[in-house]
Image (cartoon, rainbow, N blue to C red):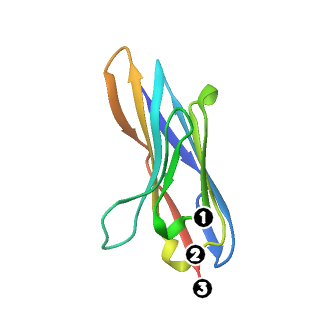
Amino acid sequence: QVQLVESGGGLVQAGGSLRLSCAASGSIDSIGFMGWYRQAPGKQRELVAGITRSGNTNYADSVKGRFTISRENAKNSVYLQMNSLKPEDTAIYYCNQFLYTSSFGPRDYWGQGTQVTVSS
């Protein structure tokens, strides 16, 4: 059974910082793409940042220069450092990992979501 566990969300004032973490546990053969998505009330889920196994990254325009995604393959973990937070960054943030397991082959896995609230 593979699980993704997120941590690091919370309430912060505008201009502040938070660091999100996501670790996968279980019988994992390898991990491909890792990403962070977010969903604000009344809006569709959107990709915030993604990182390939080789370390290539991409970001939503709205977070470029403020957020940094990183990964630690040995720990099956992905991180999102969020600086200069704005009220419009308020959302539930979801971790996504594309995992290869002997039981289920390649497939997407999602974390449970962590709330990030930025006050003005």
> Mark 1 and mark 2: span between their CA atoms?
8 Å
Q: Residues within 10 Å of mark 3 (few under 14, many from 20)?
A: few
Q: Position of residue 62 (x, y in %)?
A: 49, 70
Q: Earlier in the sequence, mark 3 or mark 1?
A: 1
Q: Position of residue 109 (x, y in %)?
A: 38, 37
Q: Name the residue type under label 3.
A: Ser
47 lies above or below 70: below
56 lies above or below 30: below
* Residue pointed to by mark 1: 10
Q: Element type at marker 2?
A: strand
Q: Quadrant of the N terminus?
A: top left
86 lies above or below 30: below
Q: Name the residue type under label 1.
A: Gly
> Mark 3 and mark 1: span between their CA atoms?
14 Å
Whether residue 27 can be seen here: no
Q: Position of residue 21 (x, y in %)?
A: 60, 47
Residue positioned 61% across, 72% down in the render: 85
Q: Is residue 81 left or right of residue 88?
A: right
Q: Earlier in the sequence, mark 1 or mark 2?
A: 1
Camera-side residue: 112 or 86? 86
Residue positioned 43% across, 28% down in the render: 2
Q: Element type at marker 3?
A: loop
Whether residue 40 can be seen here: yes
Image marks 2 and 3: residues in contact by CB distance under 8 Å = yes
Camera-side residue: 28 or 52? 52
Q: Is residue 116 left or right of residue 109?
A: right
Nearer the camera: disc 1 or disc 2: 2
Residue positioned 33% across, 25% down in the render: 106
* Residue pointed to by mark 3: 120
* Residue pointed to by mark 2: 118
> Mark 2 and mark 3: span between their CA atoms?
7 Å
Image marks 3 and 1: residues in contact by CB distance under 8 Å = no
